[in-house]
Image (cartoon, helix red, strand yellow):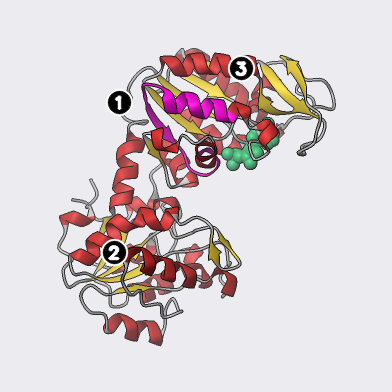
Amino acid sequence: MKVRVDQIDVSGKTVFLRVDFNVPLKDGVIQDNTRIVKALDTIKYLNSMGAKLVIASHLGRPKGERKPELSLKPVAEELSRLISREVIFPGEVIGEKVDKAKESLKEGDILLLENVRFIKGETKNDETFAKELAKGIDIYVNDAFGASHRAHSSVVGIASYVKLSAMGFLIAKEIEYLSMATENPKKPYIAILGGAKVKDKIPVIKNLLDKVDTLLIGGGMAYTFLKAKGFKIGKSLFDAEHFEDAKTLMEKAEKNGVKMLFPIDHVCVKEIKEDADIKLFEKNIEDGYIGVDIGEKTIKSFKEEIGKAKLVVWNGPMGVFEIDKFSKGTTEIAKAVANGDLISIIGGGDSVSAVKKAGVSDKITHISTGGGASLEFLSGKKLPGIECLSDK
Ligand code: AMP
């Protein structure tokens, strides 16, 4: 077991807290502060225990260059507003100015570093940069679940240059809930997978095939499987590179006695655009058409399965849900999952937007804050940002 922040003495210590403040920004204005809000438990706890807090995060992909539009300054202001305290923002990640600011921190002070990805070494887990980050730091706390699948200097490297490292409350909660899907899961257990990228979901399906009773596959990724089953998929998404994998997974499912359900009817268009004319197809899709959502019969059959479940894990939309006309399948599945008498765990990214769009997010047991990280966790992989922390 990894050490949790409330199991160590942080009072009077300088604590480096890695969070995920990768918020959507438009013209310097934060569009959604959820990620900042999610980090508040750990920040407030460390602050109340008298730690001298140095917070770090990435924002977007500046690729090792200082990009003013990806500065964490608006985040510092929003954090200050949320906790009603001053947040010191030196505007740099490392260097003399930061060293001085760190040295003059008093108990209860909060400092936010500039975007760690302004420095080239960050994404390479560069040792020199990690050492710089660790300068003057006593304890490292990781609460950036969404970045914990990345071996970067501010997530992993820094742990080698401090005496003690621990996880924050957000990561602890993520592990607690996501483990419900990987260790002794409640049964019947259903995994719903959708979205566009077959590649990302293959390791998840592989790992879950030993655990789930039923797999419901929808969205663009379903068509590679449907083609492997001999159906015509028209111009729908097809991943030739993972065609054989899809076949292998279906064989393994059969061997394991896992029921694998695919769409049986499809909402199709000739071109993916708002005003496209819709044509419905059952089983085979005519040449020239693209499947963009699951049809009514599929919704009904998927809902029937969800109705039997005690545990549902969901990652990836059932169609191109960003366009209202093609969002019905995703919305209906979101409602069925939310309203069921079951534990529901939803992976990050698009599935989270989908449950928000359906207005049912408050009925979901756990909405993960990390898209990629939750997928890796569900794939059974160890996350480097958690593995590097001190053991109890
Ligand atoms: P992923 O990142 O793999 O979870 O994919 C999410 C994306 O998949 C969303 O932007 C959806 O619009 C897209 N998507 C879902 N279903 C389809 C489909 N049938 N055809 C094309 N794109 C899709």
Q: Which residue is drawn at 81% across and 35% down?
A: 271
Magenta stretch bounds: 330-351
**Label 2 SS:** strand
Asked if residue 45 is positioned above or below residue 356 in the image, the reply reads below
**Label 3 SS:** helix
The residue that label 3 is drawn on is 298
The residue that label 1 is drawn on is 184
Q: Residue 348: image x %, image y %?
A: 48, 43
Asked if residue 256 is positioned above or below residue 25 in the image, the reply reads above
Q: Residue 129: image x %, image y %?
A: 43, 73
Residue 67 visible to the viewer: no
Find the distance from the CA under tag 2 to the CA under tag 3.
48 Å
Asked if residue 106 is positioned above or below residue 227 in the image, the reply reads below
Label 3 sits on what residue type? Answer: Thr
Q: Residue 148: image x %, image y %?
A: 41, 52
The residue that label 2 is drawn on is 140
Label 1 sits on what residue type? Answer: Asn
